[in-house]
Amino acid sequence: MTTDATSSGPVEHVAIIMDGNGRWATGRGWPRLVGHRKGAERVKEIVRAAPDMGIRWLTLYAFSTENWKRSTEEVLGLMAIFARYIEREADRLAAESVRMRFIGDRSRLDPKLQKLMAGIEARTAPYTRLNLTVAINYGGRDEIARAARDIACAVAAGLMDPAKITAETISQHLDTADIPDPDLVIRTSGETRTSNFLPWQAAYAEYEFTETLWPDFTPEELGLIVARFGNRERRYGGVLA
């Protein structure tokens, strides 16, 4: 009996949990923010290399809803790094036809950062060579809760029949409504948990966990992981004939 099971083929959407910046720095006796700055430099390299590997969609987990628990110094430093990246990379991303957008709850972010985010989204909206999505103040459970509230409001207003709510309905109310689900999720630094990253969207994604800390994660290692992905069988709950 045939099923929907298929070989993986080329990977188009890679999502990465960029972990290990702080450990990378403290292991060298440096402040954690040094690691975050080094991690931002690594982002530039990965973004530049991704299209040549056939990757059309790249989603990066930059700051979670739980990361507010970190020290004020680290949180403010991270926000400054995000702003600096947007300001410094806007021209290059546009020149290389990279579209940049953000997912997550922006309401808690500094208004100036929100303005920068909206500006680069508008500027790069026409481009399609690489779709770069950055998750800031993002949590999968928070995203699903926000989607549920939106749907509940639509039902209460008589705009939606609750009997007709499907999985696709929920997907259409997520931050990623117009972004395809990831084929492959990578987590760096040796941790083997998903940390509330794209729980709905990654239901059938393949996962790869690497010991490499994010500042040391090279395009070459990404290329090896992408190559291994091509040898996997994606069953989607089925069985190969």
Image: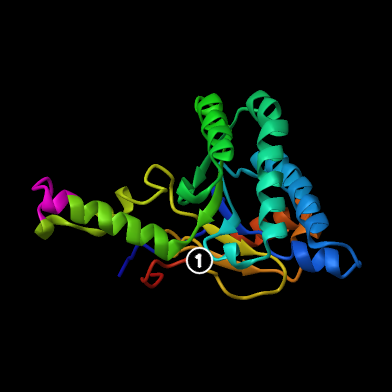
Residue 158 inside the magenta-drawn segment = yes
Local packing at callout 1 (Cα closer than 10 Å; few below 14, some 14-19, many 20+) is some
Residue 16 vs 69, above or below: the answer is above
Residue 154 percent location from the top left of the image: 17, 49
Quarter of the rendering occupied by the N terminus: bottom left
Please report the residue visible at 43 percent of the width from the left and 48 percent of the height from the top. Answer: 180
Closer to the camera in the image, 154 or 232: 154
Quarter of the rendering occupied by the C terminus: bottom left
Q: Which SS does the magenta portion mostly show?
A: loop
Q: Is residue 155 visible?
A: yes
SS for tag 1? strand
Residue 69 inside the magenta-drawn segment = no
Closer to the camera in the image, 50 or 72: 72
Closer to the camera in the image, 57 or 172: 172
Residue 31 percent location from the top left of the image: 84, 62
Q: Which residues are magenta?
A: 154-161
Q: Is residue 16 left or right of residue 138?
A: right
Which residue corresponds to mark 1? 233
Q: Is residue 173 left or right of residue 71?
A: left
Amino acid type shown at disc 1:
Glu
Please report the residue visible at 74 percent of the width from the left and 60 percent of the height from the top. Answer: 214
Please report the residue visible at 87 percent of the width from the left and 70 percent of the height from the top. Answer: 27
Residue 48 percent location from the top left of the image: 72, 39
